[in-house]
Image (cartoon, rainbow, N blue to C red):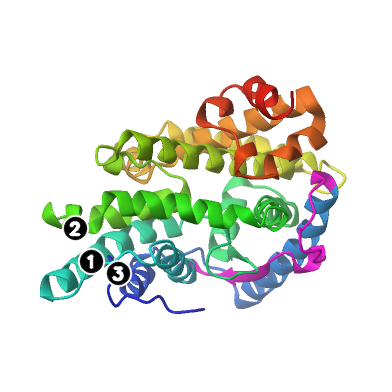
Amino acid sequence: MRPPDDARGPVDWSAAGRLAGRLAPPGPTAPTATLVALVDELRAAAARAAVEVEAISGLHPADGRPAAALSRVLVVDRSGWAAANAQVFAAMTEGLTVGSGAGASVGRVAAAGEVGSVLALLSSRVLGQFDPFVDPAGRLLLVAPNVLEVQRRLGVDAGDFRLWVCLHEQTHALQFAASPWLVEHLQARIGGLLHEVGPERLLGAGDVGELAVAAVRAVRGRDGSGILDLLSPAARQVFDEIGAVMALLEGHADVTMDQVGPAVVPTVRTIRARFEARRDAGAASTGLSGVLRRMLGMDLKLAQYRDGAAFVRGVRRRVGADGFNAVWTSPDTLPTAAEIADPAAWVARVRP
């Protein structure tokens, strides 16, 4: 994987990735043979999932590539996920500089410590992630220890759960493959927000790390309340647009992963019920766990999944799956934040 260029950026992203790898909590233990089989099964599940989501979604890669080439699959551990995400954030903040000199260097290192800590916390909570930003062909990150841990906690069928997770992530891969303009659209929106805030303004406040965490949250679609006060009304609207796109992406993936049905994932209903119960229990947590959830924006992320899924289902009830797929046509057909909450308004605007 390409090392990030930290020469003048707001964060030493390489250091952030290394620190996150050291701070990431250890994953579950298992015999070597079990772990080797897990990696092989995740790769096989990802390959099968790509075929299934293409068949059921009605979407196809714009460049005509076969489903087998939908994404480059990387099965990683927690430190590997952290390093990969440091690259994602480096790509998203490319061109954003804080100059040179001792003060800027200290700021980059301090920001790396803050972001590394956030990545370490997130590294144990992510099952999979599609990254369209670093590799032009897209890469699918499957976090093996987390898949194993959650499968054990839920007490669900191992093979079904692994395929179910891959269905979600390969749906993301297909979204971007079917809409090649989407990655550039998101990069422009997120990059514009970060430039609007400006590292100099944050350096003046002695907190360049806030910019770094803003990048983390923006890319992952999490709460950006730390930077909202720094945004102009126009930029605030862009921030809301990014949130609407993230809700669309996550909601569509959630609907698709369940739509395959028992013929593909025999225990899909059991998995969904137990997974939702786990989400609800986490949202109701208090104490340190609740503080961490709020700090990482996990409750708002959960709302994105559910609001986005409700939007997808609402549109499909009105115009069907083919009508819904008009959403992937161009930036103009993406839903606004208001339309995510009102599917009929999107239909009236895009599919009159």
Dot 1 or dot 2, earlier in sequence: 1
**Disc 3 designates what residue?**
9
Q: Earlier in the sequence, mark 1 or mark 3?
A: 3
Q: Quadrant of residue 278?
A: top right
**Region in magenta:** 56-78
Measuring 32% from the left and 54% from the top, which residue is drawn there? 195
What is the secondary structure assignment of the residue under circle 2?
A: helix
Circle 3 SS class: loop
Q: SS class of the residue under badge 1?
A: loop
Compared to residue 113, the image places residue 328 above or below, namely above
Q: Around disc 3, counting alpha carbons within 10 Å, would you say few (fewer than 14), some (14 to 19), or many (20 or more)?
A: many
Query: Do labels 1 and 3 touch, CB within 8 Å?
Result: yes
Q: Which residue is mark 1?
A: 98
Q: Is residue 107 left or right of residue 326?
A: left
Residue 44, given in percent of the width and then of the height, sits at 76, 67
Whether residue 215 is visible, yes or no, is yes
Mark 3 belongs to which amino acid? Gly
| Disc 1 + disc 2, Cβ < 8 Å | yes
Contact check, label 3 and label 2, Cβ < 8 Å: no
- Name the residue type under label 2: Glu
Residue at the (65%, 55%) spot, across then down: 176
Quadrant housing the C terminus: top right
Give how far across and how far down residue 140 sits, in percent: 62, 64
Q: In this image, 16 relative to 104: left or right?
A: right
| Direction right: furthest residue | 263
| Distance in Å between CA atoms under marks 1 and 3 | 6 Å
Q: What label sits on residue 200 in the rendered view? A: 2
